[in-house]
Amino acid sequence: MHYLDHAATTPVSPEAAQVMLSVLTEQFGNPSAQYPLGRDAKALVDQGRAAIASALDCKTEQVVFTSCGTEGDNWAIRAALHQNRRVGKHIVTTAVEHSAVLQCVKRLEQEGYTASYVRPDGEGRISAEAVLAEVREDTAVVSVMLVNNETGARFPVEEIAAGLKDRPALLHTDAVQGFLKVPFTAKSLGADYITLSAHKIGGPKGIGALYIGGRAKNTLPLLFGGGQEAGLRPGTEATAQIAGFAKAVELRAARKEEIFRHLAACSAYARERLGGIPDLRFIGPGDAPHILSVSLPGYPSQNIVGELGEQGVCISAGSACHRGKASHVLTAMSLDKRTAAGVVRVSFGPETAREDIDALADALLAHKTKRFPML
Ligand code: PLP
């Protein structure tokens, strides 16, 4: 199999899986229990939090575990709106956020909030000026992702944070696709909330974290219950997932530079190989090294993904094509219909080898040679 869909999810690293197994079967205590098995479980949670905090270069108490990136996005936006409830009911976001942000904001609009959606340019870029131009006196929260999951475009979160310094609006960034893929720390970004998810970096599904720092205070709890996670997100801690997440972060953080270089080399090699396919277009600015978006204009992406999948080459039309309609990201970029319908996303991880990219290039070329354009 040639797995080239690391932006969708990643294999759990064997070391992380090993740690999880031992937590599930041996160190299985409830972190709230008062005997050694419980205290050991509590220590695991503390160590896990310390690992995430170290990768973000922030304080441990600024990291709260969540069940996934979607939860972090929803919670951060609602928490910011709650904190700024006297400021107003206006939200600024972009038209190309992940649905975890977009659908949350759409729901909030139904609840009486108003929202402005900043559109990208034709390459999928968002400028800080365009975002800041939408910020008003009554803007309570600005939510702009760090790396777009479809195009790999990196957005100027630092500049947006600087522009909001003297404004009441709080800043949230969904860094699910950016964490340990592009360099940043909590301080360098300057956002008040940062969403992370484990399964994009060799950790398990069903666990994420929310950084709550900067000007965020008196955070609205997500749930009410037993007081875990400083009362902000109660519920018995998912100890195995937390330990697996932490292990994945430690492993990737320790090899950060090497992995950045590897991903960049994968992207460069893929550009070279795929660039030889007639009419193929590269989509987006190619900022993040792990995501490469390309189009075979006229060749529907569902067919490409289906056919390549049969040959063991896993790529995604994923978000790029939802029930036959071009994605909201490609639509916002104003790509012509033929190009948008032919977009597929290729994404790399530390395990990606040249042979995977060769298999992709051969399969794409064969698809194009064998089929007639349908659009
Ligand atoms: N945000 C972005 C940019 C993503 O790519 C994803 C996952 O695809 C999410 C949020 C949601 O994360 P999770 O799957 O952990 O809910």
Image (cartoon, rainbow, N blue to C red):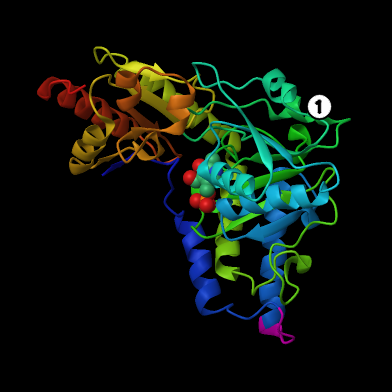
| Neighbourhood count class around disc 1 (C-alpha, 10 Å): few under 14, some 14–19, many 20 upward | some
Q: Is residue 257 magenta?
A: no
State the image coordinates of residue 257 (x, y, percent, origin top left).
59, 33
Where 80 sits versus 313, above or below? below
Q: Residue at x 85, y 31 (%)?
A: 165
Where 47 sits versus 326, above or below? below
State the image coordinates of residue 236 (x, y, percent, origin top left).
64, 75
Where 18 sits versus 268, above or below? below
How many marks the image carries: the answer is: 1
Q: In which quarter of the image is residue 193?
A: top right
Is any part of residue 99 visible from this angle? Answer: yes
State the image coordinates of residue 115 (x, y, percent, origin top left).
66, 36
Mark 1: amino acid: Ala
Q: Nearer the viewer, residue 5 or 106?
A: 106
Q: In which quarter of the image is residue 116?
A: top right
Q: Nearer the viewer, residue 231 or 310?
A: 231
Magenta stretch, residue numbers: 32-37
Q: Which residue is drawn at 10% across and 24% down?
A: 370
Q: Mark 1 points at which residue?
A: 162
